[in-house]
Amino acid sequence: MIDRIDAALFKNMVLSAANRLCANKDTVDALNVFPVPDGDTGTNMGLTFMNAAKEIENNDYATVSEVASAVAKATLRGARGNSGVILSQIFRGVSKVLKGMDTVSVPDMASALKEGSDTAYSAVMKPTEGTILTVIRKCAQAAQEFEGEDVAAFWDAVIAKGNRTLAKTTQMLPQLQQAGVVDAGGQGLMFVFEGFAQAMDGKEVTLLPMSGAKAAPKADESPQQQTKAEEIRYAYCTEFIINKADPAASADALRAAISPKGDCMLIIDEEDIVKVHIHTNNPGYVLEQAVKLGEMVNIKIDNMRLQHSSLTGGADEAHAQDAEPAQAPAKPEKQLATIAVVAGDGLANTFRELGVDEIIQGGQTMNPSTEDILAAANAANAENVIILPNNKNIILSAEQVQYLTERKIFVVPSRSIPEGIAAAMAYAPGLSPEELFGAMKEAVSTVKSGSVTFAVRDTSIDGMDIAKGNYLGLAGGKIAAVGESLNDTAAKLVAELADEDSEVISVYRGSDAAESDGAALEEILTEAYPDADVLFYDGGQPVYYYIISVE
């Protein structure tokens, strides 16, 4: 019988949970309520938790407290999508209770799960029952009711209660009942807890690779990433973690010392560790300054000029060899910057033309992590940063950035590209950050938006029979039109969005819609709405054939 969890066992539990979750991410992805290509709950949760597993994999810990703290920090930085953020909040709560503990007993873990549940609930503005929140709450309840000291039996009881609750989620939410599935986030959480239980055999766990994961979107730190090798001002992408010699020490001196030596700097100072990322021509100097704070681990230095040359077939190799090291300082901090999450070159250019400072490539099916958004905020280098998530599943991840930086973060609740564009257009010189944030939120509420995509499976929703491959028109989070013709479906969607007062209809054509289809739809809409301005743009976005706004 195991009556206490020590650091080694807890580490194995986390690695085992990551393996279990990532091995079943496709199962979780498939539990998508709507038959649209956005079933990425399993991928988001897997990437979030794998970030924690990789953080602890090659480190030795003396206490459970140290493991829990590392997991909490790594899941927060790596959180993707609403499900990933909620998962990170659960482990943030767990870490609070386990802080300072060398080993933990069943009652300790029960208290930790209760705090994890409470922390997750508090992170969501309007908690919805029948979701991962219900599952963690019932798991925590079972944990507190458990009598005994056997850790393995404890997890068996927690999992049994969790799976019974998960099965009930199908009846708790109408949309789950219609689709005939359980909650995806709750299922992902159960895979985590099942992974915990599998580690009770005492065998050392080896972290397995996460297969089939989508590439992590990167912040567009223009113009270096889009230019020739000789125009890359700072050649070496330098990353590492510092285990502080003195946990109370501040990273301010390091930040001040290395800031003039590069750009795209990211320094996360979290209690006993500091995570550093910087593009520099002198990584040796950066390491010399860093070692003053403590021991460095996970050191990674990449020559971006050589990487660029390999990607371009070596065309820029000669230029890279001859380039003189640039010593220009990093761009100065300004009062305000804006960031937008966008997929598609055309849409990215639209946001840049509206004055957005940094673009994060991402959106539906490719949610950026909290750390991706944080990196863009640091690249923007402003005291106040306004973030336009432009997707409902990215808002919560963006809101976590405020916990990782001293910059003041404002997250506009833009749930679509048209809402983000409306917010960006609300920019007015002379307004304070708070006033501008208010104006952008108000602008978001004035636009009607929709999109046309395709069905990934057969289903029946709200009385509509949908076949795999059908075109779907989405409006306000609901399926408003279904059809076998792309433009007929788009026209039906616009009819749902427009009325006699509509003045402007804007259509952004995606990468999978042919130019001829776009031209034909423009004729259809121009004829149907003679009193409105019908505007067409080349958005280049994936997933959606058309993104449409009506004002």
Image (tube, rainbow, N blue to C red):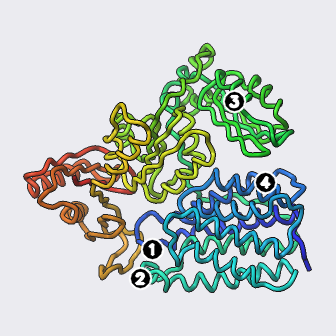
In percent of width and height, residue 405 lies at 61, 42
Tell me the distance, in whole angstroms, between the alpha carbons under discs 3 and 2.
53 Å
Q: Position of residue 77 (x, y in %)?
A: 64, 50
Q: Earlier in the sequence, mark 3 or mark 4?
A: 4
User: CA gap, disc 3 to disc 4?
Assistant: 25 Å
- Dot 3 or dot 1: first in sequence order is 1
Q: Is residue 352 above or below residue 340?
A: above
Residues at marks 4 and 2, CA–CA distance in whole angstroms: 41 Å
Hey, what amino acid is under mark 4? Ile
Numbered badge on residue 390:
none
Label ID, residue 56: 4
As measured in the structure, the alpha-carbon distance from the residue carrying label 4 to the one carrying label 1 is 34 Å
Residue position for label 1? 33
Closer to the camera: disc 3 or disc 4?
3
Query: Looking at the picture, which amino acid does disc 3 mark?
Result: Arg
User: Distance between the Cα atoms at labels 2 and 1?
Assistant: 8 Å
Amino acid type, residue under disc 2 in the picture: Gln
Going from N to C along the chain, the mark reached first, 2 or 1, is 1
Quickly name the residue at label 3: 255
Provide the secondary structure element on which disc 2 rests.
helix
Q: Earlier in the sequence, mark 4 or mark 2?
A: 4
Residue positioned 53% across, 82% down in the render: 169
Residue at x-position 58% and y-position 16%: 328
User: Which three-letter amino acid code belongs to the residue tagged 1?
Assistant: Val
- Do residues under tags 2 and 1 come within 8 Å of each other at their CB atoms? yes
- Disc 3 vs disc 2: which is toward the camera? 3
Residue drawn at x 30%, y 82% is 463
